[in-house]
Image: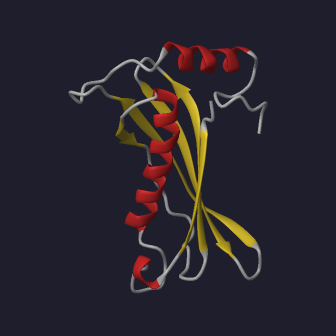
Amino acid sequence: MDKTAHIARLVLPGHTNRHGSLFGGIALSLMDEAAGIVSTRVARGPVVTAHIASVDFKAPIWQGEAVLITAALVSAGTSSMKIRVETWGECLEKGTKRHCTTADFVMVAIDQHGRPRPIPKEARADIEAARAAGGSADGDEGA
């Protein structure tokens, strides 16, 4: 099971504020989308965002650059998952990237009534096996 997601978008004029940098709300929306992809893969069903840890925008992403979003499962409980999401700006002409923000998203698996439901046992077993083997929750050996 893939416990990561990657999104790349070109920052266009309609995505920017009056300073020519990506709107923070658009960045958060993309981050939430990536966290949703990872957590839906793990939960094998609907999820909702329950919490977003501190989001500090460290660098702007300018119009004409690419915004790169990476998300990876950090841990999982019975119905909740912690997803680490990073945002990068890439100057396509120079080929340079810079880290812009990191945030931890807590996503919760829900049932048809919107109540928390357990993550499938197979997914929890897979996560625990990776952790016991000394890897991260996404199965990578250190990063």
The x and y percentages for residue 117 are 34, 20
Residue drawn 40% across the image and 31% down it:
45
The x and y percentages for residue 67 are 57, 67
139 is higher (above) or lower (below) than 16: above
Residue drawn 51% across the image and 34% down it:
41
Residue drawn 20% across the image and 27% down it:
113
The foreground one among 141 and 52 is 141
Q: Residue furthest left?
A: 113
Residue 48 sits in quarter: top left
- How is the protein colored in the picture? secondary structure
Classify the position of the C terminus by image quarter: top right
The x and y percentages for residue 1 are 62, 30
**Disc count in the image?**
0
104 is higher (above) or lower (below) than 55: above
66 is higher (above) or lower (below) than 12: above
Q: Is residue 76 left or right of residue 131?
A: left
